[in-house]
Image (tube, rainbow, N blue to C red):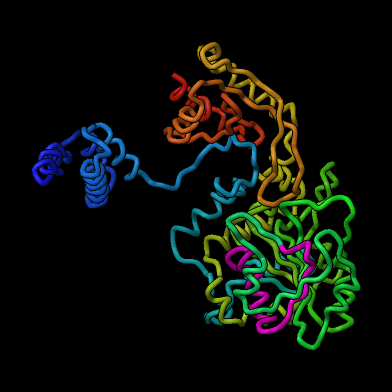
Amino acid sequence: MKQMNEEILRKIPAINSLLNEEEIKKLIEVYPKKLVLYFLREEIDRIREEMIAGKRDGIDKKEILENVKKKTLPSLKRVINGVGIILHTGLGRAPYCKNIKESLSELLEGFCNLEINEENGRRGSRMRHIEKLLIALTGAEAGLVCNNNAAATYLILKALAEGKEVIISRGELIEIGGSFRLPDVMRAAGVILREVGTTNRTHLRDYEEAINENTALILKVHKSNYQIVGFTKEVPIEELAKLGEKYKIPVVDDLGSGAFIDFSQYGLPKEPVVKESIEKGASLVCFSGDKLLGGPQAGIIVGKKEYIKKLASHPIMRILRIDKTRLAILENTLRLFFDEERLLKEHEVIKMILKKEEEIKKMAKKVYNALKDKKEKYQLGIISGESEIGGGSLPGVKLKTYLLKIKDKNVETLARRLREGKIPIYGRIEKDSLLLDFRTIREEEIKLLIKGLKEVLN
């Protein structure tokens, strides 16, 4: 057995010989030799283990070089989203507005006034860069930002209700992507869950009957990624706010998506608007920064000053705070909402949601016409379909769209090759075809898309 292993291992090329390969030399010219060497050794170790385990009996030097090249190149990269889900968590959710790049370049090149008070030169709060904007846009008394909306929910529960009861409707005990379950977060925050009502119907009296001397707050959660239809009843935030005021208990409205504009004015279903929740009396409202707001990953909390102050001073806030880069992106994104004309022109998420069908079809035709020599082999065609907003926003809403259909008997292999190409392209698979949805493909990406498709569709 030992002799057989030695014979197998002799087939593995030496590191020094691989370092002399032209492709490896080119990598070392661009990337640190130490990094290239690390991935080279990792690849050799993998092959050695597979050979000893009997999973392979030969060596493919080309495979080794290709794998090392893939690992050495930067892992996080821009991709073309042809999946048709606008807020796709796997693809980074909200694409940033174009003005972000210009405003960030200067900030990233040097130091900035993140926590310095210009008047006295002493340390100040990083929240001052965005708090006034949040107040102006939502009508709240104060605001702060943490890592994401799950963190925002956790912070509120921990700071305001640890060791006490939190009342919530049974129909709002949500689970979202990544196995985030609200009861688990409540348990982790050290609060006692007091669920009221039934899955489909909860009345105001259910909340009131549950209030006792150990009640810390009432939590309402927007069902952002599912719908309950039929014989249903839920208590609106304004009624809960009045109940909270009666018993001097804060009422928290977790909106999830956090819309700053009313999408019903554009013919879409009504999504809760942050400002309206504040106007209806919610003590605190929390929501995501990278969904309908179109900014960076963040958990935004707005509401009454007395509660925001408690959150800001809690030790957990230090752990959950965001950095200067995300604050800068968020500031620039929020400023767009003060100018409706600019907002509709520059806000990438809103632009994709409101994209006209004729514009989508025109883009699809442009790509279809550019692939004339591939039409017969791949039975290319333009078909109508539906896109989704995603990210737990406007659940159940389908947006009409047009897709490029690429037929291939090995469609899974084709999809992988497109994902791994020089210009990574992501689409969705239906039966024996790959579909590229042009609602989520931007006009400036068309040339790149054509180039990427031509490189793979040989």
Name the residue rendered at 55%, 60% in the picture: 326
* 92 to the left or right of 54: right
* 143 to the left or right of 327: right
* 194 to the left or right of 312: right
The vertical placement of 25 against 45, above or below, is above
Whether residue 277 appears in this view of the structure is yes
Name the residue rendered at 60%, 36% in the picture: 83
Q: Position of residue 51 (x, y in %)?
A: 22, 41
* 385 to the left or right of 2: right
* Direction bottom: furthest residue: 213
Whether residue 136 appears in this view of the structure is no
Q: Position of residue 59 (x, y in %)?
A: 21, 34
Q: Position of residue 383 (x, y in %)?
A: 68, 23
Q: Quadrant of the C terminus?
A: top left
- Quadrant in which residue 26 is drawn: top left
Of 193 and 291, nearer the camera is 193
The vertical placement of 204 against 353, above or below, is below
Name the residue rendered at 75%, 72% in the picture: 284
**The magenta stretch spans which residues?**
145-173
Verify whether residue 169 appears in magenta: yes
Of 290 and 210, nearer the camera is 210
The vertical placement of 166 against 322, above or below, is below
- Quadrant in which residue 174 is drawn: bottom right
Of 218 and 273, nearer the camera is 218
Q: Position of residue 172 (x, y in %)?
A: 76, 63
* Direction left: furthest residue: 3
